[in-house]
Image (cartoon, rainbow, N blue to C red):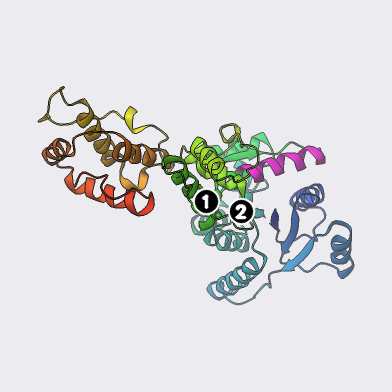
């Protein structure tokens, strides 16, 4: 795991932020690759010692004394180039009311990098009210509020700070670090980092990893003796593969498909037990058979149960929408067309009656293209 820690002035040894950054970096260097990004230059001896003792590399953002828009643009370009070369997993920003911090956070987020913000007490009621109209309100409107709202999560240094941020209604994803104990802080921050990464894995998952899951699912649902070829390339993250399969409700299909292809897999990850932030855009992990589907008046009666089941399943898929179907739901549709013996003509008449003919054609086309449904196993 590669982490970039941004703090404006690391040379200020009296600062609480400096102390926290130092303890976090020192306690996590054994499990992360740490980079320090700062504005104020540090003594060469200090930079060398950090590199030799802890493996921490120091980088600088040049402070441009030009007028505000030009300075912002210049620092944004610097941050963009640096993040592109480092390709970190996480960018952790410390401090509030610092426009450069907001620039770094924005550039990281634009590259789909997990961003963590520690306001360091800057959003407490006392600090917020200090020079509110002349100083804090303009900055709040310009960058501070959207930096806090947009980051992956906020890390508070105390329960009071957490309460203050919650009261501002800027962010609900707020974690709190334990006070003083360096070891506990290191363990806590690593759990926060892992939680944030697991919650944002779709930003990192590769096409090859998604395709691995899809090929395994295809392998599981097809009845052919010859297994579907599953391309196993180097650098696959099985953690992301299991996360993706779980969110697609296809862990069992993944296991069955890889077993059928004789591909060795690490022990199944218990994704349900992993701490993750709620994803409002997550697909609904529910069987299409359990979807509350109410059709308009049917033209066929109870004497055609299989045809009615087929129509209801297709209607449930229409209600869910093609892009929102999980791999598990696609497997149910595949099984419907491939293995359930129903009268296609009767089903087609009912689908026409329910105005589902056009959708069914799109469904069949995708099943044939992406899920290898053989020709002849369709309705239209």
Would residue 140 appear left or right of 124 to someone viewing this image? Answer: left
Residue 81 in view (yes/no): yes
**Mark 2, residues whose alpha carbon is within 10 Å: few (<14), some, or many (≥20)?**
some
Report helix, strand or loop for mark 2: loop
The front one of 322 and 113 is 322
Query: Residue, x 64% and y 63% (percent of image)?
Result: 87
- Indicate which disc residue 236 carries: 2
Query: Residue, x 71% and y 44% (percent of image)?
Result: 190
Would residue 185 appear left or right of 318 to someone viewing this image? Answer: right
Q: Does the CB distance between marks 2 and 1 fall below 8 Å?
A: yes
Residue 294 in view (yes/no): no
> Is 196 covered by the magenta stretch?
no
Query: How far across and down, in percent of the image, does residue 339 sit?
Result: 32, 36
Seen in the picture, residue 335 relative to 128 is either above or below; the reply is: above
Q: What number of labels is visible? A: 2
Seen in the picture, residue 95 relative to 265 is either above or below; the reply is: below
Report helix, strand or loop for mark 1: helix
- Indicate which disc residue 212 carries: 1
Find residue 379 and report its image quarter. top left
**Mark 1, residues whose alpha carbon is within 10 Å: few (<14), some, or many (≥20)?**
many
Would residue 70 appear left or right of 319 to someone viewing this image? Answer: right
Query: Residue, x 50% and y 53% (percent of image)?
Result: 229
Q: Which residues are magenta?
A: 180-195
Label 2 or label 1, whichever comes before in sequence order = 1
Instruction: Return the residue found at the far front.
Output: 225
Query: How far across and down, in percent of the image, does residue 21 sit?
Result: 76, 52
> Is 188 covered by the magenta stretch?
yes
The front one of 278 and 247 is 247
């Amino acid at each position: 795991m590669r982490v970039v820690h941004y703090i404006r002035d690391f040379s200020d040894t009296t600062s609480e932020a400096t102390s926290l950054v130092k303890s976090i970096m020192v306690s996590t260097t054994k499990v992360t690759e740490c980079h320090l990004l700062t504005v104020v230059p540090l003594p060469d001896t200090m930079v060398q010692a950090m590199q030799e003792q802890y493996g921490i590399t120091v980088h600088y953002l040049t402070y441009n004394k030009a007028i505000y828009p030009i300075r912002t643009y210049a620092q944004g370009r610097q941050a963009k180039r640096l993040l592109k070369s480092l390709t970190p997993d996480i960018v952790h920003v410390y401090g509030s009311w610092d426009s450069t911090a907001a620039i770094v956070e924005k550039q990281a987020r634009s590259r789909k990098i997990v961003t963590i913000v520690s306001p360091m007490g800057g959003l407490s009621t006392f600090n917020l009210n200090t020079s509110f109209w002349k100083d804090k309100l303009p900055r709040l409107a310009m960058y501070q509020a959207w930096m806090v709202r947009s980051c992956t999560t906020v890390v508070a240094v105390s329960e009071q700070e957490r309460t203050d941020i919650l009261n501002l209604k800027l962010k609900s994803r707020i974690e709190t670090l334990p006070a003083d104990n360096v070891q506990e802080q290191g363990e806590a921050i690593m759990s926060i980092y892992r939680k944030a990464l697991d919650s944002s894995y779709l930003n990192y998952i590769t096409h090859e990893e998604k395709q691995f899951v899809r090929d395994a699912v295809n392998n599981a649902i097809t009845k052919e003796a010859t297994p579907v070829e599953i391309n196993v390339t180097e650098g696959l993250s099985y953690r992301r593969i299991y996360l993706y399969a779980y969110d697609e409700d296809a862990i069992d299909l993944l296991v069955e498909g890889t077993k059928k292809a004789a591909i060795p897999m690490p022990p199944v990850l218990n994704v349900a037990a992993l701490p993750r932030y709620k994803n409002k855009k997550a697909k609904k992990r529910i069987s299409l058979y359990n979807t509350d589907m109410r059709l308009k008046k049917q033209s066929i009666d109870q004497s055609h149960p299989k045809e009615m089941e087929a129509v209801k399943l297709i209607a449930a898929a229409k209600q869910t929408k093609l892009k929102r179907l999980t791999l598990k739901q696609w497997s149910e549709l595949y099984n419907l067309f491939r293995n359930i013996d129903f009268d296609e003509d009767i089903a087609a008449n009912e689908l026409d009656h329910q105005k589902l003919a056009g959708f069914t054609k799109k469904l069949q086309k995708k099943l044939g293209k992406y899920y290898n449904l053989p020709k002849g196993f369709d309705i239209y």
